[in-house]
Image: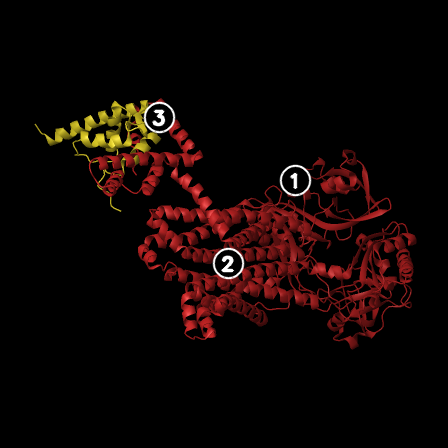
Chain colours: A red, B yellow
Amino acid sequence: MGAPVGRDLPDSQTDVVSRMSTRWHARWSRLVDLSRPSRLEGDIDDELRFHFDEEVEAGLARGLTPEAARRAALDSLGGTPIRLREELRDARGVSLAYDFRRDVRHGVRLLRRDTGFTAVVLCTLAVAIGGVVAAFSLSDAWLFRPLRFPEANRLVVAFMANLKRPTEPALWMPYRAYLSWKESARSFSSVSAAFFRGATWQNGSDAKSLVGMRVTPEFFATLGVPAFRGRHLSANDSTAAPAIVLSHGFWQRELGGAITAIGSTITLSDVVYDIVGVMPPDFDVRLLDRPEGAAFWTLFRPGERGYEPGGLGPVTLLARLADGVTIDAARDEAAAIMTEAERAYPVNFTQPDAAGNRFVVNLSSLQHDNTRTLRATLLSVLGAALALLLIAAMNVGVLLLGRGLRRRGEVAVRHAIGAGRARLVRQFLTESLVLSAAGGTAGVALAWIAIRLFVMWNPLGTLPPDGIHIDLRALAAATAAMVTTTIVAGLIPAWRVSSSSLGASVRSGDGHRVSAPAQRAQWLMLVAQVALSTLLLVCAALLVRTVLQLRSEPLGFATQGVWAAEVSLPVAGFPTARARNTFLERISAQLGGRPAVRAVAASTVAPLTGSAYVPVSLDSADSAATPRMSAPTITIGYFEALDIPLLAGRGFDRRDTAEGRPVVVLNARAAAQLFGGVDRALGRRLRLGDTTWREVIGVVGNVSTTFFNTLEWRMDPMVYRPAAQALAAVDNPEAAHVTLWLHVRAERTLVAEDIRAAAASVSPRAAVVSVQPIAEMVAAATRQPAFRMLLLLCFCAGSLLLAAVGIYGVVAQAVGERLREIAIRIALGAEPRVLVVSLVRSTVLAGMAGLGIGALLAVLLARVLQSMLYGVDAGDAISLTAAGLILLSVTVVAAALPARRATNGAAVHLLKT
Amino acid sequence: MSKPPDLVQGTLDALILQTLALEPLHGLAVAQRLRTRSGDVLGVSRGSLYPALHKLEQQGLLRAEWRIAESGKRAKYYSLTRAGRRHLAQEQREWERLSAAISLILKPT
């Protein structure tokens, strides 16, 4: 149909008003037509019928036979009424919209009739789209959406990393590096230092443990965020009265958001601070993927040990890159400056430590730092979701292809009575769109639910600072992928059917035979599906092995029945070692006397972590090669309470008083490293960074610790000191916290309130900050790998199910086509088993091919997972074999089911009827 | 499917408009007029008349109403709208211009 003539006329000759009214008229009549399609149809029919009737009468009047008159009338109309009607509707321009409505209704009707098929396709679409959207929205919230700071991509964080793993932070930076960078680095427009500082906030009888940050005065300027109320900390505050800036959350939660709070004071760990400002609600500086940011910020105080020129106090350096400087360039410059500055000190970071570890500067973007351990989890989930989407797309493709081919009969009939190819294609297209639209909607709903559940469940133990939102880009992309699939798979049959020699198909009654190319396409999709499923399954198997390994690893101490209570002993209330020791003795006695408690002890280390490292020397001079080891302080009975085995000598007892001979107990690792063996350590002497010689009186088993949430258990060398001798040496406010370890009898229960009450009765100044079972903390340490495993298992189950459905569908279709043949062959005495084999052979072959390709892919790609694996290699044969066996059995079962059903009577039944 | 060679698209439109310029007619009558008036030279291809009528109505050049025909049956009568008349005048001018130009070429003096 060409363009209307009027459009070709030069503008000057047409009247603008008339053009407008013409257009208005056109629109109005289309509107009328659309709203009443049936009236339109009626009108068209009436008009054509009038023409037809008149012509028939005229023909009869001319003396024609009724039959000839009818034929002449039809001839004068110029086509079958159906085709003419379609053409007229086309001419009115309503047919697209109108056909669409009709096709939608037709499609919905067909889909509702075919409930099983529809349910499978819709579920597949919904799960795939929902999975991708949820996974991408999660990843986006952490990894892709910039942090809420001005030009956040220029914010970088520095740590020290072991040269062997330069991308993993291993140590804090020394404070003096901050001074040297601030002085000479050109790569940064601003450099600041920060360090976590815990504090206890005593609010009446209730004590809260807060995490805050000590920072340098440039901290806020570096981040580029103004104060919400009041002001930032300035350099002047470091010499004036202690000043503090609060987080919005703390201010709201604990101080009721009162504006009068600014200018008042707050006492944290016995230090009185002036509140000078509050930061905005979205100011959330996190370090090292900690689940939350600081509650408050204070300045490093002059005279604080380690935070003076040349000081080795631990900090992270938070800096803003200067314009046009890349992270790599900045890292090179900063590392060079640090190396140069370090040379001035006899013991410095350019030398390797005792274990031969060399340390390098680790500089990463703040966002990268915040998502260090999450990144692998999120990306693996995203990868799995994408794989599932691909599998689902192929599955839907397989199903739609099969269904479309089954409908050859319907299509052929419609073609024969006058539906053009474009019309048929349009109808199939509409049906595909109906499916995708419904699937997409369900997918969004699913993603929404998944995200809500994720937030409620919080499986990673951390949530992004500014929430998780459904990502529209992901939704658009996933939906587009599925729409494309459904359209392509939906159209192929319409296209082929309407283009090939249809008449033959209708006449022969053989409208069900599947064409070879379509079958090949199905076969290829099956192979790809199984390959992807194999890949997912291998990855899941590797993660399962990792978690099993992590869970089964002996930690070296009792985890069942042991509780850890963190107790704060403020310096003001417990100024001397004697005061602390007395408190620990008395509370131990008090709790130990309870029937529920089997043993109780205390230590200065938090559960599952090592303590601060101290140099351990065997001679009178410290050197760069002096090993540094974790040196926890423990009370008598610690080893018994935690079931840590004594390997040689004895543990601490009443003889080891402050006045007695200084003693230590080593763990096996330290004994081996220092003296070459457990037996050789007893009676030997060592120094712990001071001038006191301490004698080794015993060796105990190793215990595992974790480090910065990394996926491994470490068995570090440890030097235990008795609390009676060591607590006096501690002046670090951090050490105001001690951990009480309670081994509870299985049949009795002990509640946190008992511990709080006991602490309060011994001293009102002591505050129990938290009480947790160790088993729970161990579970928390393996939470990320477990979550990864769980998610991947879910995706695997999904992909297996889809693959099974796809395989089942293809075989069922093949069986349906050959039912008659099968029946005849059975009637002629064919062995059903042989028939089954012949039916499933090509499908099982596809499965095996997919399995091979998938295994190959897994061997190549699983390397990406290496950082998420523990105690298992990426090429792990057990995982590969397990995945292969599972997939093979799924393939065989899914293929054999429909084939068995056919040979078990369905076919014979067909012949009988 | 094979159709008889069409009248140049647009020419049919002009002919229909011209036919309807005198009086409102139904589709069958338009077909008959076109056949008789052109002396059967311009056989309006069967099957293209009604689509053309509907298209012109859609464009606002024709309006349609249901009336009782001479035979006593309900029939759909088409008549020109103002825009249709204007369009026809334009078509005629255009045609005259074109035919004048063609005669100039075909009849050299």
Looking at the image, can residue A185 be seen? no
The chain that hosts pointer 1 is A
Q: CA distance from mark 1 to mark 2?
A: 46 Å
Badge 1 marks a residue whose secondary structure is loop
Q: Earlier in the sequence, mark 1 or mark 3?
A: 3
Circle number at residue A391: 2
Return the residue at label 3.
Answer: A19
Name the spot of residue A444 as percent of width and height, x first: 56, 47
- The amino acid at mark 3 is Arg
Quarter holding residue A702: bottom right
Q: Earlier in the sequence, mark 3 or mark 2?
A: 3
**Which quarter of the rendered picture does the N terminus of chain A lie within?**
top left
The chain that hosts pointer 3 is A
**Which quarter of the rendered picture does the C terminus of chain A lie within?**
bottom left
Badge 3 marks a residue whose secondary structure is helix
Q: Nearer the viewer, residue A734 or A484?
A: A484
The 10 Å Cα crowd at callout 3, few under 14, some 14 to 19, many 20 or more, is some
Q: Nearer the viewer, residue A564 or A368?
A: A564
Return the residue at label 1.
Answer: A225
The 10 Å Cα crowd at callout 1, few under 14, some 14 to 19, many 20 or more, is some
Q: Earlier in the sequence, mark 1 or mark 2?
A: 1
Badge 2 marks a residue whose secondary structure is helix
Q: CA distance from mark 3 to mark 2?
A: 53 Å
Give the vertical position of A102 relative to A803 (above or below): above
